[in-house]
Image (spheres, helix red, strand yellow):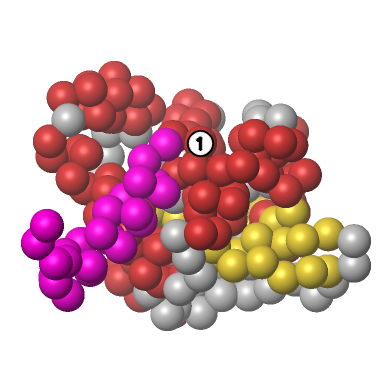
Amino acid sequence: MAQRGPKQAIYASLAGIAQAVGHPHRIELLEHIAQGPRSVDELATIAGLTFANASRHLQILRRARLVDTARQGKHVLYSLSGESEVVALLKALGCVGERNMAEVRQVMTDYFSACDALSPMSREELAEQLRAGAVTLLDVRPEHEYSLGHLPGALNIPLHELERRLSALPRDQEIVAYCRGPYCVLSFEAVAALRDKGYRVRRLVDGFPEWKAAGLEVEVNPA
């Protein structure tokens, strides 16, 4: 039997990482953890999993060194291990999927493009607009995720509260909405709803994790 060389050892390790992200529940869990440290209970509830199932998936991600754990009181919190690299990995996976998979392209056309056919705003353009005070930034994630970290100056109105809190949004300034990431439906639905009400609104090209991973400024609400 041929002895495994250094290249094969590296490829075996990379294959282990690929296997760790090779399940839709684990990709979704990584998206939720990218918003900030979360417990197994929280992640199970958000992802619609049983505690045991969520714990099993998290252990697989931990063995691949994609997540770390830290104890806080009685809870074990999961966070990304190498945040910028893991976010970049998920981004690359999405780009390959959009290019290569007909089913991914079809969903993007049937759902996402139908909700928002306009080109989203890039991070660079948003940073420039924020410096000029030219836009209102809208975070449509749940309040707890917003408190873990958000873009500077962002107004938090969770999607389910948008209809009753329209008065908090300006009519005379463009609004830029963002949420958990490029495939999170919250910002798409917010943009569609606000345009129906006559607001000038665009979507950020991705979400909070990508903004943070790019080394841009974020704010965290004090505990």
The residue closer to the viewer here, 151 or 103, is 103
Left or right relative to 83: residue 103:
left
Read off the residue under disc 1: 25
On whether residue 27 falls in the magenta region, the answer is: no
Q: Is residue 74 above or below residue 56?
A: below
Say whether residue 170 is visible.
Answer: no
Residue occupying image coordinates x 20% and y 62%: 11
Residue occupying image coordinates x 45% and y 44%: 27
Query: Element type at marker 1?
Result: helix
Residue 206 screen position, x and y as percent: 38, 53
Left or right relative to 74: residue 38:
left
Say whether residue 93 is visible.
Answer: yes
Residue 107 figure quarter: top left
**Which residue is the extreme one toward the left?**
2
Which range is magenta?
Answer: 1-23
The residue closer to the viewer here, 205 or 41, is 41
Left or right relative to 63: residue 2:
left
Three-letter code, disc 1 = His
Task: Characterize the magenta stretch by its predominant secondary structure.
Answer: helix
The residue closer to the viewer here, 4 or 163, is 4
Residue 210 screen position, x and y as percent: 41, 63
